[in-house]
């Protein structure tokens, strides 16, 4: 049986090569801007020292919850728990004065 496989397998130099081209270039897809995610921010209160914020991913509709040490750290580009890139902005602030 091993001789049958050897007969069917292409031998080196027999012309069974993959055609390649030196001029072929691989181009990546253009990057799109991440969707805007307005967040509701809850200030530190009591023993809690972090800012909590929640937002909805506009791509899939999933709600996300996160925390930040400062109010300025809430905004910016994030990868949400659902895997989509979002740009978080503060829409409403509750609790502590900003």
Image (tube, rainbow, N blue to C red):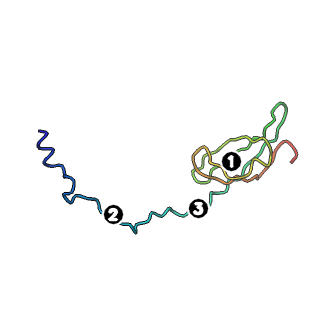
CA–CA distance between discs 2 and 1?
Answer: 48 Å
Q: Is residue 85 left or right of residue 96?
A: left
Residue located at (80% from left, 46% from top): 71
Residues under labels 1 and 3: Cα distance? Answer: 20 Å
Number of residues whose C-alpha sits closer than 10 Å to that of mark 3, classed few (under 14), some (14–19) or many (20 or more): few
Q: Secondary structure at mark 3?
A: loop
Residue at the spot 57% in from the left edge and 47% down from the top edge: 83
Residue 20 numbered tag = 2
Label 1 neighbour load within 10 Å: few <14, some 14-19, many 20+: many
Task: Judge whether 37 appears above or below 64 on screen.
Answer: below
Residue 79: x percent and y percent? 62, 48
Task: Give the residue furthest to the front.
Answer: 13
Q: Foreground residue, 10 or 73?
A: 10
Q: Which residue is mark 3?
A: 32
Q: Say whether disc 2 or disc 1 marks the residue closer to the N-terminus.
A: 2
Number of other residues with Cα within 10 Å of mark 2, as a class: few under 14, some 14 to 19, many 20 or more: few
Q: Are marks 2 and 1 in contact (CB under 8 Å)?
A: no
Displayed quadrant of residue 48: top right
Which residue is at the front of the view, 19 or 39?
19
Which residue is at a point 15% across and 45% down the rendered structure image? 6
Say whether marks 3 and 2 touch (CB < 8 Å). no
Q: Position of residue 44 (x, y in %)?
A: 82, 38
Q: Position of residue 18 (x, y in %)?
A: 28, 59
Residue where numbered disc 1 is placed: 55
Image quarter of the N terminus: top left
Work out whether mark 3 precedes mark 2 in sequence or the reverse, and give the earlier one: 2
In this picture, residue 83 sits left or right of residue 46? left
């Amino acid at each position: 049986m091993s001789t049958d496989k050897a007969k069917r397998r292409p031998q080196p130099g027999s012309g069974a090569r993959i055609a390649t081209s030196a001029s072929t270039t691989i181009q990546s897809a253009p990057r799109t801007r991440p969707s805007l995610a307005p967040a509701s921010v809850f200030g530190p209160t009591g023993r809690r020292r972090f800012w909590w914020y929640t937002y909805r991913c506009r791509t899939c509709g999933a709600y996300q919850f996160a925390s930040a040490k400062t109010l300025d750290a809430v905004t910016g580009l994030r990868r949400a728990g659902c895997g989509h890139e979002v740009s978080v902005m503060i829409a409403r602030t509750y609790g502590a004065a900003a």
